[in-house]
Amino acid sequence: MNWRTGSRMDTLVKAYTRLGRFSGSVLVARGDRVLLSKGYGLADHEHGVPNTPRTAFRIGSQTKTFTAIAILRLQECGLLDVARPLEEVLPGHPGGDRITLHHLLTNTSGIPDYITTEDFTRTMGLSRTVDELIATFRDRPPLFAPGERMSYSNSGWVLLGAVIERLTGQTYGDHVRSEILAPLGMERSGLAASGDVVPGHADGYMLDGGRAVRTPYLDNSNQYAAGALHSTTEDMLRWVRGLRAGKVLGPRSLELLVTPQVDGYAYGCMAAGGRLESSGGTIGYVSLTTHYPADDLTVVVLANAENAAYTEIETALAAIARGEPYEVPGERVFVPADPSVFDACTGRYECTFMGRTSTIEVTHEGDGLMVEVHGLKKTELRPMSRTRYFARMKGEVELTFVGEPARKIEMLWSGHPVTARRVA
C-alpha cells in the first residue's frame, strides 16, 4: 500500500464528482491508517462552501445502528431484555404484549412504516413530538404477526427511541451523545433539533446534470431514532474503531449487534459477504459506512446529494484498497423521449425491498415521464432507450419497463436489483 493507492481513490471520486454523480466526503482507512480523507463538491452551493473531511452530513438510517447500540447498553445495565415484550418498557402500545424489542431491532414486528404513507412527504416539514410521531402509525393494522417475517419499518425504531427516553429520563439525542458519541470522541456528531444551526453542516441537494437543486425541508423530528443523527467521515471512523476496541459495548453485545438475524440484517446494520454495512438515505442525503473485518478496512461515504452514486463509490474504493478490479465511471448517454411508449409505462407499481412494500407512481407530465416513490421526491425519468430510463432518487436508479403495456419494471437501484410489478 502506498501513496498511489490514495491517488487512484482520489481520481475515482473526482471522476464521479465531475460527472455530477457525487457531492460529499469520503474516508478510507486500514486499521487506524487513513488512506484517503477528502471532501468533494460543495456543502452549500449558494455560497460556494466546499465539502471537507470535517463537514457534517445527515446519516439517515445509520442512526438505527446507534439506536441498537444504546438499547444493548441498557441491556448490559440490566434495565431491559431484548427478548421481552415491548409492553414491559413502553406500556400501552397496541400489540406490545406480543412484540418484543428483538422484533423492533430486526424489523420483524409487523408494524407498518410511517415513512411509506402518502401523507409523509406532505407533512415532513412539520415539527412533531415523539408522541405525535408515534400517533402517525400507532393505530394502523399490523402487516403480519410479530416474528412471522421481515418488513423494514422506521416505526419500530421510533418506538425504540421512546424506550430509551423512558428508561433513562434523557432525550434520545442527549443519551446517544453522552453514552456513545462522547466516549468515542465523536465531537462533530449529534442530533440537531428543529431550528438548530450546526456549524459546518452540509445542505441537502438533488443533483440534476450540472445543477444542484435544494431538496424540500424535512424536519428532523420526523426521523428521530430512526434517522436523525448527523456525523462526519472522521467521526464515523472513530465509531468503527471504538466499537472494535470495546469502548461502548462488551464482547457479547457487540457480537449480537452484528450477528445476521433475517436475510443478512442484524441490529440496525447488514452483515453479509465478509463485510459489515451501516447505510442511510434521507431527503437530500445518502450515506454508507462499511467495515471489512478480514482486512481491517473501513470505507465511509457521506453525501449531501440524495441521488449520489454512493454505493458504487464505496464498492470501487474497497476494490482499490484490496487490489481488486474496479470500474471507472463513464458518462451516461440519453436519447430523445419516445412519446409512443408513455401510455404503456404510466401507472402504479409496487416493489418490495427488505420485506417492505413501496408504491411507485409513473406519470406522463409535459414532454416526458415522471416517477414518484412514496416518501421520496417526484423526479424525472430520463430515457436511455425506448424502454430503459434513468432516475435520480435515493441513489442512482436504472429502470427497464417490461411489456406493452408494462407488466413490471426491472430496476438496478444503488447496485441492488429490484422488481416493481404493476398493480390495478
Image: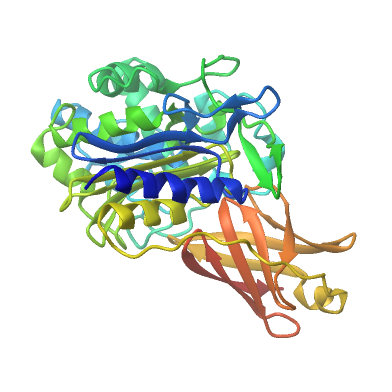
Residue 169 occupies which quadrant of the picture?
top left
In this rendering, position of residue 296 left or right of residue 43: left
In this rendering, position of residue 184 left or right of residue 60: left
Which quadrant of the figure contains the C terminus? bottom right
Regarding residue 90, the answer to whether it shows in the image is no
In this rendering, position of residue 241 left or right of residue 329: left
| Position of 226 relative to 166 (above/below) | below
Residue drawn at x 82%, y 73% is: 342
Is residue 323 or residue 308 the one in the foreground? 323
Is residue 275 or residue 282 the one in the foreground? 275
Residue 90 occupies which quadrant of the picture?
top left
Is residue 397 or residue 250 the one in the foreground? 397
Measured from the top left, where is residue 46 in percent x and y?
A: 71, 26
In this rendering, position of residue 270 left or right of residue 394: left
Measured from the top left, where is residue 8 in percent x and y?
A: 38, 50
Measured from the top left, where is residue 211 in percent x and y?
A: 72, 42
| Position of 363 relative to 112 (above/below) | below
Residue drawn at x 49%, y 30% is: 57
